[in-house]
Image (tube, grey):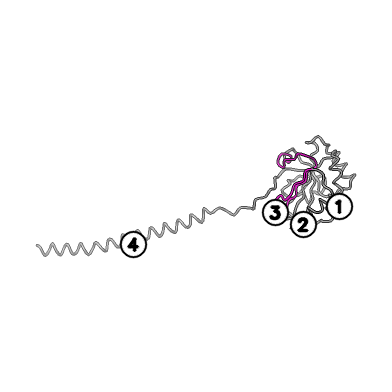
């Protein structure tokens, strides 16, 4: 009887390590599977690459002229950056004497840097009580201005760009970052200097 008991104990003792080993192998396999799953979930959860942030505050506009450069007869300001060029955004009005004073210089410098820098004039006269759309069109024709010009459909750009005086000019690099803002009339030499820096950048 004693021998039988001893033999039974040995038999159980031999089975125990085998069962433990199998259990350990199953646990190890589960841990490996969980590790692989964690890696896959982490990869799926990775955020998609973001477009670089810009300073462009978008608003709707309607072209007086230069619809092709503006992205259409009815477009948005952000579309002008699709051309990959620095942009000079000039807010003006048809009955604004300082605007009238600087626009010939804008045209001259726009011609000099054509293809390198895009000048865009946006009429906000109806929102600043400085002229109608008809007065704006008349001013463009009188001064022989032919760079892209449009009118804002509402007062949104005045708020977005915090316009406090007329004219106001915002200089953007090709990536849409604001590099300079000038409130008031720009002289030709000032304008040329600023656009030259934009073109060089």
Q: Could you tell me which residue is drawn at 87 percent across and 48 percent down?
A: 104
Q: Are there few (<14), some (14-19), or many (20+) residues within 10 Å of tag 4?
A: few
Instruction: Determine the CA span between mark 4 and mark 1.
Output: 81 Å
The residue that mark 2 highlights is 199
The residue that mark 4 highlights is 25
Q: Position of residue 62 (x, y in %)?
A: 78, 43
Tell me where the magenta segment starts and ends, as one range. Answer: 157-183
N-term-proximal mark, 3 vs 4: 4
Does the segment drawn in magenta span residue 173? yes
Q: Quadrant of residue 59?
A: top right
Instruction: Determine the CA span between mark 1 and mark 3.
Output: 24 Å
Secondary structure of the residue carrying numbered label 4: helix
Q: Residue lying furthest top in this view?
A: 129
Kindly check if marks 4 and 1 are in contact, taking CB atoms under 8 A apart as contact: no
The residue that mark 3 highlights is 175
N-term-proximal mark, 3 vs 2: 3
Instruction: Determine the CA span between mark 3 and mark 4.
Output: 57 Å
The residue that mark 1 highlights is 108
Q: Position of residue 70 (x, y in %)?
A: 77, 49
């Amino acid at each position: 009887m004693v021998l039988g008991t001893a033999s039974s104990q040995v038999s159980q003792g031999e089975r125990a390590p085998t069962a433990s080993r199998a259990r350990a192998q199953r646990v190890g396999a589960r841990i490996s599977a969980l590790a692989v799953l964690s890696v896959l979930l982490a990869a799926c959860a990775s955020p998609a690459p973001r477009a670089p942030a810009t300073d462009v505050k978008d608003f709707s506009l309607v072209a007086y002229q230069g619809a092709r450069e503006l992205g259409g007869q009815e477009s948005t300001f952000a579309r002008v950056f699709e051309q990959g060029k620095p942009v000079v955004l000039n807010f003006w009005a048809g009955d604004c004497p300082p605007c009238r004073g600087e626009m010939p210089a804008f045209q001259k410098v726009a011609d000099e840097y054509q293809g390198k820098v895009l000048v865009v004039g946006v009429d906000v006269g109806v929102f600043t009580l400085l002229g109608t759309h008809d007065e704006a069109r008349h001013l463009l024709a009188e001064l022989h201005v032919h760079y892209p010009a449009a009118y804002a459909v509402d007062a949104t750009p005045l708020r977005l760009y915090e316009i406090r005086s007329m004219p106001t000019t915002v200089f953007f690099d090709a990536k849409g970052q604001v590099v300079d803002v000038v409130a008031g009339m720009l002289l030709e030499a000032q304008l040329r200097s600023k656009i030259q820096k934009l073109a060089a950048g």
